[in-house]
Amino acid sequence: MGIEYVIAKSNLKVNRQKSLLSIIAIMLTTVLFTSVGIICIKNYVEQKNMIEHLYGKNHGRISELRREDIDFIQKQAQLGEYAFVGKSIVDKNYISIEYKDPMLQKLNLIDIDLIEGKVPEAENEIMLDKEAIELLGYSPKIGEHIKLDYIIEDKHCETEFILVGITQARENFKLKGIYFAGVSLTFLENHVKKEDLRFTAYIRFNEKLSITEINAKFSQIIENINVDKKYLRVNEFYLNTKVVEPSSALFVIVIILIIFTCAFLIIYNIFNISVIHNIKAYGKIIAIGGNKRQMKKIVFFEGSILSAIAIPIGVAIAYVINFIIINRLISKNPIEFSGYYLMVILMSVAISYITVFISILKPMKIASRISPIEAIRHNGKYKTKKRKKYYKQLTVFRLMLINIFSHKKRTVLTLMSMCFSSILILIASAFMNSVKPEDIAYKSVGADFIIKLHNYTEEESKTVIKLNQLQLNNPLDKSLIQHIQSIDGIKNVKIQKKVRAKLGEDSLFDSVSCIPQEEFDHLLGKAPVHDKNILLIGEDANVFYSFSDGQVLNVVIYDGNRKLEEQFIVHIIEENGLFVSEDIMSKLIETNINFNISMNIDRKKYEDINRELRSLVDKNDNLYIISYFDTLEVVKKALHTKSVLMYGLAIVVTIIGFINYINTMSASILARKKEIGILQAVGLSNRQLNNLVELESLFYIIITIFTGLTIGNVSGYIICNKANDLMGGLTYSYPYIQSCLFVALMLIGHIVVMKIIKINLFKDSLVNRIRFSE
């Protein structure tokens, strides 16, 4: 190492306080950069894994394919085959028998939840959900012989299979009493007529293709094999994992800029004060032959040495916080270390080092421009063109003002970092204080309890009952409604009705809400029209249909086993959903189309009502209950995690700002030790000196508190109102407790810092203070 490195190392040893504060600032900066990166990647990985588990790593699927269609597609893309074979009913539970191509698992096109064994290959081999095996009365172990009664094309059959694979049933299907069995291709071909064989192909193209190119590929395939486009389902959920949402990217960028700004202000200020403090030493080096490049290298090496110490410590602390503390205390989904997180750590190290380097650029430039003559004459203050202001009478307050404003740059930088952190923490406080979990939960549910139909589908399906078929024997009948209304404490019982419908020839099946005429007229927002069939479609829902306002649409309505074809005039509205008038629908529909029953309750009687309602629902597999109170608990847990992260960020940023204040105060006292000694020699008492130091500290503290309580709270009010307009669930509430805590902690910090500074100041005798030399 050269002489520059040796001098830099020596400077850091001499100025231990500056070195320690710099290490803490860089360390906290690294902690924040790394933590933000880990949390963002964790959310992305969790969402990606969940989507891949639910929807698979395929780009889409095409149904109703013949064997020759499969062969044609296989030449252009990777695919795995699926086919429905038959069903088995066991104690009211439904076992769907299916053929799943081994390539589905091999290529991860869909997650078949295989926990042990393999996919069937021989005709007498079977793969079953673990719960279905137990339901059939067998042990879930590979090699078990299982006798299964089943129905294929309305024919009852019985076969003894050998268990070769065990799968895990998914919770949503377990609740519905639906399980899955997998058989081999040989079994499928031997038990289903060739002309009746229809496959679903799960397809994946080259991963480098864009979403637009993938959609074009699918369009070309269905055109070539002459399949109706309604049988194509593009896996948009999986495709969207390849794209970063602009709102998410903007949020991360804003957080990084906040951390960078705070870090820049403190590191720059520390090094700026250090360079000014060492001007005479740098001047002597230049006088004996040092050049500008060497001066820059000295400051650069100081920053590099401090970074080499602080950044690894910051990464280690971030690792402990995120992988140990959050894993064990906060997160339900533990973080597993992977290549993603290694990449985040490396990027955090790079960004932290770049932050330090940018922060020391100006101090490096200052150090390189020092001339020996200026350095020898330097007294810690820069000359200005403004005329000095003299006082006839010098008071402690005026002495404080002289010192504060003789170092305007240092004062401004310190105030900027402290005020910025105070604004940030009070914005976070206002936001978290204004988020009302009760409002979010009630907005999500819309009532205290909702009992709704369950275990049905709107699509064509051989495995799950369709909505219109369920409504033939609708469990939400008059007797159930009367029973609910008779329960003590229940009030405001409302019934929502829905019908299964197909909107246009090429559209998907959907459910349409039937609402009272008065509510329908309000949504329509025009002069009431009672003699025409009008279909209201929300703007969000119309994204999938692309209907135009005023379009005449052929709608197929499913009323039990009946199929009705009616024409409706489309009107696009802001409210999300599909709506028709209850009066119009009542003239067409004969079956009971009740879809859910919502109600509010006397909350003092919650326990009894909750028990009674759940006992009603438990008696019927086609009913499901949604509770405001359960939703509230989920919302509170989610908000708790968010508040910990948000307050954590704000508190660390505040600590960084406070370090700047400590550095400024200690540097100010250290640089003026000789001056203070001379003032005491000519009559400045210890009490006046004590007041002088207190006033200088209070100058920063009071301005920081004032800025936080004014700009911080006003900004919090504006942000909360804007957020409420965008997503709702916020009612601005002034953060009284947080504001009082903020003021109290600032004053406590002031007292502690003053205590330490005074101990260091008064431990030297008056003679030693006068003899003090920089």
Image: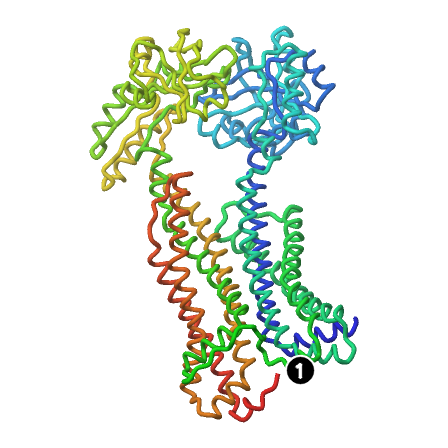
Q: Is mark 1 on a helix, strand or loop?
A: helix
Q: Identify which residue, 631 or 704, lies in the foreground.
A: 704
Please determine whether, in this image, residue 313 is positioned above or below residue 675: above
**Residue drawn 64% across and 9% down?**
226
Q: Is residue 575 left or right of residue 10?
A: left
Residue 37 picture location, percent across and down: 59, 50
Q: In which quarter of the image is the N terminus?
A: bottom right
Q: Position of residue 378 (x, y in %)?
A: 62, 80
Is residue 166 at least partly visible in the picture? Answer: no
**What residue would you read off at disc 1?**
376
Is residue 109 in view? yes
| x and y percentages locating residue 642 in the rendered image | 46, 49
Say which quarter of the image contains residue 591: top left
Task: Give the side of residue 237 with respect to residue 566, left or right.
Answer: right
Q: Nearer the viewer, residue 201 or 443?
A: 443
Q: Which of 205 and 333 is in front in this view?
A: 205
- Mark 1 residue crowding within 10 angstroms, few (<14) / some (14–19) / many (20+): some
**x, y (%) of residue 245?**
56, 37
Instruction: Identify the residue at horizontal 31%, vertical 12% (top origin).
Output: 584
Q: Is residue 523 above or below residue 636?
A: above
Left or right position of 437 against 289: left
- In the picture, the quarter occupied by the C terminus is bottom right
Relative height, residue 362 to residue 344 (above, below): below
The residue under label 1 is which amino acid type?
Ile
